[in-house]
Image: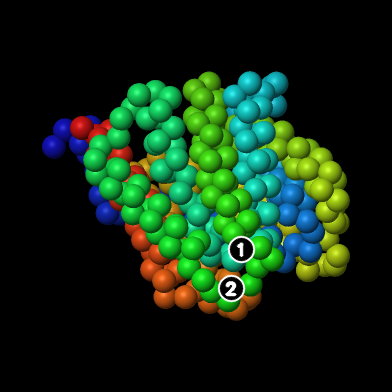
Amino acid sequence: MTAAASVAAPDRADRRAPLAALILGACAIGFAPVLVRLAETGPAAAGFWRLAFALPMLAVLAARVDKAAFAPPSRAMLAAGLLFAGDLAFWHYGIRYTSVAKATVMSNLTPVVVTLAAWLAFRERPRRLFLAGLALAVAGAAAMALSKSNLPGRDPPLGDALSLATAFWYAFYFLAVRKAREQSSASRVMFWSSAVGAPILLVVALAMGEDILPAGPGGWAACLGLGVAHVVGQGAIAWALGRLPTATASVVVLVQPVVAALLGWLLFAERLTPVQALGGAAALAGVAFAQWAAGRKAAS
C-alpha cells in the first residue's frame, strides 16, 4: 500500500474521533430548528441572535489559529455573509410556517443544488448515478410537500417553498465559502460571514416588524443555544470532513434532519404521515446517493 493510499483510507481507530465529531455536529445543528421555535422572537431575529451569540466564540477560535483573523474581509467573505443571512432568514420563516421535519429535510437538498450549479456554471457534467439520486431526492421532497396531513403550521405550502429556497441560498453560500477558503482559514471565514450576516438579519427583523428581544429567560436560553449549536455544529463538521471519506460523511451528516424530526415530534406533536415519512427517507437517501456518485466521479 502506498503512502497516498494509507492517507485516503485511514484505519478504523483513526476514524473514531472524526466520526464522533461529525455525529456531534449533525446532532447539534439538528437542535437548531427546535430552538428557533422556542426563541420567542421573530424568525430573522432568531437568526440575528444565533450569529450574535456565536461571534465571541468564533472570534476566539479565529484569533487562535489565524494571525490575520481580523484583517478586512474579502469580497467572497462579504458575499458569504450576505448569502448566509438569506439562508437563515428563509429557513427560519420556513420553520414558522411548516413543520420542523419538512423544513429541515427540504433545506438539506443543498448538496444536489451545489452540484447542479457546478454543472451549469462550470460545465462539470454529473454522472447518470448522480441524476438518479437527484430524481429520488426531488421525488421524496415532493411527496413530503404534497401529501395532506394535519401537521401544525400557519401556511405549510409557503413554509415548504421557503424551506426549499433555503437549499439554494445555502448552496451559493457554500460556493462563496469555497472561494473565500482559497486564501483564508475556515475559522476566519466563519467569523466574517457571521459578522456580516448578523446586522443584515437585524435589519430584516426590524423591517418585518418582528419581536427582537425574547419574552423571557426561556427565549434567551434558546437564543444562546442557537449560538452554541452554530459554533459546535459547524465547527465539528468542518473538522471532521477533512478526515473522513466523502461517502461516509455525506450519510452521517443526514442525522441532522432525523434529529430535528424526532424533536419536532416529541416537543410539538408534529407526527408525519406514512407517505411523508417515506418521502423524507427517499429525499435523504437521494441526497446521500447523489453525493456518493459525485464522490466517485471526483475519485475517478
Left or right: residue 235 versus residue 268 is left
Residue placed under numbered mark 2 in the picture: 151
- What separation in Å lies between label 1 and label 2 (alpha carbons)? 8 Å
| Disc assigned to residue 66 | none
Secondary structure state at the residue bearing disc 1: helix
In contact (CB < 8 Å): disc 1 and disc 2: yes
Question: Residue 25 location in percent, x, y?
Answer: 51, 54
| Disc assigned to residue 156 | 1
Left or right: residue 2 versus residue 140 is left
Q: Residues within 10 Å of mark 1 (few under 14, many from 20)?
A: many
Residue 83 sits above or below residue 275 on the image: above
Residue 240 sits above or below residue 273 on the image: above
Which residue type does callout 1 highlight?
Pro
- Quarter holding residue 296: top left
Left or right: residue 78 versus residue 24 is right
- Locate the N terminus by quadrant: top left
Question: Residue 185 location in percent, x, y?
Answer: 55, 29
Along the line of sight, which residue is nearer the eye, 239 or 33? 33
Question: Residue 272 location in percent, x, y?
Answer: 50, 74
Q: Could you tell which of marks 1 and 2 lies nearer the N-terminus?
A: 2
Along the line of sight, which residue is nearer the eye, 236 or 251? 251
